[in-house]
Image (spheres, rainbow, N blue to C red):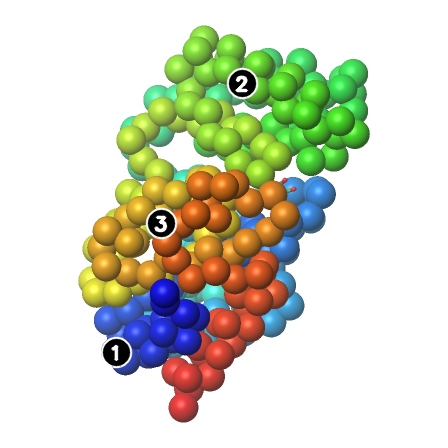
Amino acid sequence: MRTASDVILRLTSDPARCGLVMDFDGVLAPIVDDPSASALLPGAEEVLATLSRHFGVVGLLSGRPASFLRERLSLDSVVLMGSYGVETWTENGIEVLPAVAAFSDAVAEAEAELRRLFDSQSVPGIHVESKGLAVAVHWRRAADRAVAQRLVEAATTEIASRTGLRREPGKLVEELRPPVEEDKGTGLLRAIATAGVDVVAYAGDDRGDLPAFAAVLASGGEALVVKGDDIAPEVAAVDGVQFDGPPAFLDWMKELAAHLER
Ligand SMILES: O=P(O)(O)OC[C@H]1O[C@H](O[C@H]2O[C@H](CO)[C@@H](O)[C@H](O)[C@H]2O)[C@H](O)[C@@H](O)[C@@H]1O
């Protein structure tokens, strides 16, 4: 079984040919009730700056919009890929994969319908999140999460079949996003190819990370699983090194940075 120390040794043997790509929520930022209050752990930005001075690529690959990632992390040396990899922050603005544009009306229609259903607070604790290229509905703050989940899933199933959007489940959230053949796996492979690196480690915590875990393992890299209260069984079962939550993952990154600085 591989250990966190094994991964440090591997990534530090030839850092310029290696990389570290990470999810945001539940990996670099602890899970919180209010999605808009999510923030990097204190000290994470400094570590990311150090890692990016040594590695061929350091990146964030998140279900969040690229603009959200940039608000939380303003380091130019870290690649920011948002909306499951379909958008990338660049110095000239946000680049969006062209296939996604065709679905902007469908996303607007889905958001309007979800807000009509859930914004009235007739079901307290269900919250619609605007994401630009997608829309998400959360039930973490619902008193009865099981009831809320059933209501949300019924709504997203119906709206997905009507609009052609794709359902993306996460931790106490369902998202509707464009049905393009893009996910964190294709996003990660693009980042590896762009950087021209040989070995990458990918850190994630949720079902949206499964394609990236599959891609990183298939490419001979390292899967880093950050555990938390709401971890899905299929994520907990990923063949990778496990961390007990974002603070433990940050401690590992600090150790990795210290090795690189020696
Ligand atoms: O790919 P990620 O960076 O992990 O983003 C996935 C989703 O994260 C956010 O929701 C999750 O985190 C929230 C804040 O901690 C939490 O309240 C929520 O229950 C989690 O599901 C975000 O709001 C979603 O849009 C992202 O898709």
Q: Is mark 3 within 8 Å of ligand 1?
A: no
Q: Residues within 10 Å of mark 1 (few under 14, many from 20)?
A: some
Question: Residue at the spot x=42%, y=62% of the render?
Answer: 241
Q: CA distance from mark 1 to mark 3?
A: 22 Å
Q: Residues within 10 Å of mark 2 (few under 14, many from 20)?
A: many
Q: Quadrant of ligand 1?
A: top right
Question: Residue at the spot x=48%, y=48% of the render?
Answer: 236
Callout in the foreground (3, 2): 3
Q: Secondary structure at mark 2?
A: helix
| Residue 140: % across, % down | 69, 35
Q: Say which mark, if any, is on residue 14.
A: 1
| Residue 89: % across, % down | 41, 51
Residue annotated with mark 3: 213
| Residue 253: % across, % down | 48, 72
Above or below, 49 relative to 131: below
| Residue 184: % across, % down | 36, 43
Please state which of residues 22 and 81 is positioned toward the viewer in this rendering: 22
Residue annotated with mark 2: 156
